[in-house]
Image (tube, rainbow, N blue to C red):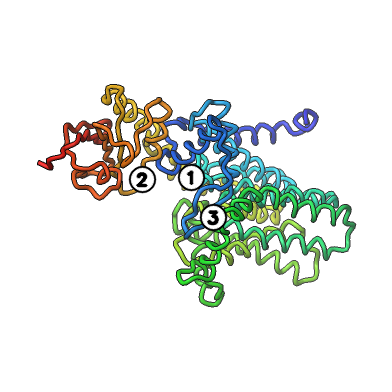
Amino acid sequence: MIKWIKQNRGEFLLISFILLLAAFFRFYKIDQYMTFLGDEGRDAIIVKSLLVDHDLPFIGPPTSVGNLYLGPLYYYMMVVSMAVFWLNPVAASGMVALIGVAAVGLIYYLAREWFGKYPALISSFLYAVSPVNINYSRFSWNPNPTPFFSLLAILGFYKAHKSRDFRWLILSGGVLAGALQMHYLALILVPVAGVLWLMELLSKTSKRFFLTGTVGAVLAFILLMFPLVLFDFRHNFLNYRGAQEMFFGKGEAVSFNLITRIGEIINIFNEKLIGRYIGGANWLVTLLVSMLIVLTLLISLKIKMAGKTLAWHYKVLSVWLILGLIGLSFYKNEIYDHYLGFLNPAPYLLIGGLLGYLKGKWQIIAGGVFVIVLGFVNFQKSPLLLPPNNQLGKTQEVARFIIDQSDNQPFNFALLAKSNYDSAYQYYLDLYGHKPKVVPVEITDQLFVVCEDEECIPINSPKYEISAYGWAKVEWIKEIDGIKVFKLIPNPSGK
C-alpha cells in the first residue's frame, strides 16, 4: 500500500480529498441534521432493549406494504455503534455516515479496476456530492446502507471472476441477504446475481471452487436470513403470507405485465434515478446524462453484436441497470428515493464506463465537463444549504421539560402529529429514567400531550392515549422551540 501511494501520489491525494469531502458532507453537524422521528425512536428502543435487557430481536422493521417485515440485521448493526457510544442515537447515524463514505470508496475501487484512475476519480466525486446520497447517509434508517451492500455484492462477483476463485461468491451471498434486510426491493438483486452466476457458469475459463463458492453463497444467504425465517416458523408464517398478499392478493403492489409498465421504466430511469441522484433535478442536465448513459449501453451492445469481446464489467453494469429498472417497473406504488438504493451506484459506474471508452484529451475534457456541470447542479441542492432540523435536540429538550414539570411523579404521555408517532419521545423519557405509564392500565394524575401540528385540540381527541385517559381538562399550555406541550389533569365531572 505504501509503495502504491509513493508511485501514485497525485491520485492518492485526489481520492483522499474526495473521501474527506464525502465525510464532511455526511458528518458535518450530523447531530443537528439527522432525522430523529418515530421510526428512529422505535429502532433506538429496540436496540436499548437488546443492550440493557438482552432481548434479542428476530424480526426487523415493518415495510410499507402489508404484514411484511425485514430481517433484524440493521438492529444488530446499530448495536455496535450504540454500545460504543452508550445508547446515543447519534452513534447509529455516524455508522450510516461511515458506510456512506465507504460506498464512495467502493465506487472508486471498482471504477479504478474497470476503467482506470481518471474515470474512477470522476465517478467517486459525483457519488460523494450527490444530494440524495448525502441526505440518506446522515441519519440512522435501515434502507440507507443498501447501496453499500449492493456494491459489496458486485465486488464479490468481480473478485470471483478476476481471480477465478469462486469462494468470493460467499461474500456476495452474505451481503445479498444484508441488502434484502435493508429494504425489500433489494430482492431485485437476486435475479441480477442469478444472471451473473449463470454468466460465470457458461464461461469457458477455469472455475476453481465453483461448487464450493456457490454452496457457500447460498448458505451465507440462509444464515443471515435465519432469524427472520425462525420468526416466521414461530408466528404462523407471517412474512410468507404478507409476501403472498403483496404479489398475488387483491391489493397486490406488483404487476408483472411488462408491456403495460414500459413507460414506467423510462420514468424511473430518467426522473427518479438520474434526475434525483445525478442531475440535481435539472431537467436538461438530467436528459443529457440519461442519453449519455444510454449511449454507453448502446456502445456496449454494438461491440457485442460485432462479435468482439465485451469487457465483463460492461456486461455486469448493463445487467444490473436493466434488470433493476425492469424490477422496479413492476412495483405499482409510488417509488421514493430510498427504494433505488440497491441500484443507484450503477449509473455512476456507467459514467466511468463512458469515460473508459474515451481516450486521451477527450476523456479529460468529458470528465472535466461532468465535474463542473454536475458538481454545480448538485452543490446547489446540497442539504447543507438548508438549516438544521435539530429534531434530536428538540426531542431531548421536550423530554427534559416534561420530566421537570412532572415533579418526579408518574405521568402518562401522548403525541399529536400528522406525520410522526411517539417513539422518539418515549425513548428519551425512558432513557432519562421517567418512562411514561401506559393507559388504561396505569392512569396517573397528569397527562402530557406534545403537539407538533399547527393546531391541536387534545380534549376529546380520538388519539388512544388521550381518550383512554378518560375525562380531563387542560391545566396549562407551554411552547418549547415551536412545539406545544399540554398538561392535562383528570376531570371526572366533565365540566
Q: Are marks 3 and 1 in contact (CB under 8 Å)?
A: no
Say few, some or many: other residues with alpha carbon within 10 Å of mark 2 (under 14 / 14 to 19 / 20 or more): some
**Residue type at tag 3:** Leu
Please tell me which residue lies in front, 129 or 184: 184
Upstream in sequence: badge 3 or badge 1: 1
In the rendered image, residue 194, in percent from the top left (x then y), is placed at 72, 62
Residue 2 picture quarter: top right
Residue ID for mark 2: 420
212 vs 447, left or right, is right
Residue ID for mark 1: 131
| Circle 3: element type | helix
| Circle 1: element type | helix
The answer for how far apart the CA atoms under marks 3 and 1 are is 14 Å
The answer for how far apart the CA atoms under marks 3 and 2 are is 24 Å
Residue ID for mark 3: 340
Upstream in sequence: badge 2 or badge 1: 1
Q: Are marks 3 and 2 in contact (CB under 8 Å)?
A: no
Q: Residue furthest bottom?
A: 259
